[in-house]
Amino acid sequence: AVSSDSSDRRLVLLLIGLCLFLFFFHLGSRDLWDVDEGMHSVSAKYVVESGDWVTPTYNGEAFLDKPMFFTWLVAISFSLFGFTEQAARLPAAVIALLGVLVTYQLGRKMFDARTGFLGGSVLATTILYLAMSRTVVHDSALALFTTLALYLFWVAMVDPERRSTSFLLFYVAVAGAVLSKGPLGLVLPALVILPFLVLTRRLGLIREMQLGWGALIFLVLVAPWYILMSVRNEGYLTYFLIEKTFGSFASEESSHPAPWHFYIPVFLGALLPWTGYLPAALYRAWKRLAGEKREPILFLLLWLGTMFLFFSAATSKLVTYLLPAMPAVALLI
């Protein structure tokens, strides 16, 4: 056991070292060349200068398209390290590192430490994940909290002794996802968990999910900011929930329209340099669904498949939307 713990620690340290090099090295070496980077950085800069930690602002007007969590992180970074490119990107790099470590822990819990290490390494080196680790965008926070929520759900399911605590922390992670990207943070974990419970005939587990306490935790963490935003910005909830969130999924007038097949080539590109491993990974996963240890494979396939189909069905499409699905495909590979 001592040898195993020592080996696990070495793998974690190797992963951290890889991420420090990939995500943090020369983090401020280029300007904020991307439009979204500039917009999100300026919004966070205004938080520090104005002292308004409730309403995100851009060009003197309330910026109502995104929740506040990631902006808070960038604003805190600015407060600590000054208004630099490195400080603007630091939260994304830290979030990416944490996402790799959660992916490692999930792979270790599902299979073994070696699988977790390889899955974390694949995730860290995919072109999409690597690019987002060095870019000021909100999607990285959504991806982290979604991955953390699914990891905590898995721990709760397979480890009865930690079930109660894991489920309560699960609601904290979901709240973080909703504060990062709105209702999508609630939808994405549900897309994976509900079909999984049905297919594995584990619907009875819902009774042990402490839904009452979970709802209380979720509301305590999420409601204050949304209420303050609604009070200070008339019509905010209508705009954000109906026009922005639902409109991005269903409206033909969405801000980033694209055809249904948009994510097929994009996903293959996002997986580079590991794209060539995807067919074998999916084929072997499909074959293992008939084996004794089918549940982890089913969970990962549902994770990848439901999110891919969900984002493909939406009228608004961006490359970054695929980020929450990347840990699943990394572990499959």
Image (cartoon, rainbow, N blue to C red):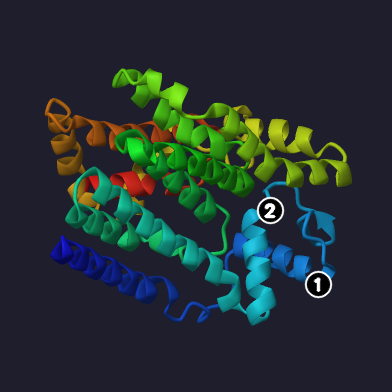
Indicate whether 106 appears above or below 128.
Answer: above
Mark 1: amino acid: Glu
The local crowd at label 2, few if under 14, some if 14 to 19, many if 20 or more residues have their Cα within 10 Å, is many
Residue 259 visible to an observer of this rendering: no
| Residue at image point 29% right, 34% down | 301
Q: Residue 308 location, x and y as percent? A: 40, 36
Q: Which mark is residue 306?
A: none
Location of residue 14 by image quarter: bottom left
Mark 2: amino acid: Met
Give the residue pinned by disc 2: 68
Contact check, label 2 and label 1, Cβ < 8 Å: no
Secondary element at tag 2: loop
Front residue of 28/207: it is 207
| Residue at image point 14% right, 66% down | 3
47 horizontally vs 40: left or right = right
Secondary element at tag 1: helix
Q: Residue 296 location, x and y as percent? A: 25, 36
| Residue at image point 58% right, 48% down | 176
Indicate whether 149 appears above or below 48.
Answer: above
242 horizontally vs 178: left or right = right
Location of residue 113 by image quarter: bottom left
Tell which circle, 2 or 1, labels the residue nearer the N-terminal end. 1
Q: Residue 327 location, x and y as percent? A: 35, 49
Q: Which mark is residue 49?
A: 1
Front residue of 76/23: it is 76
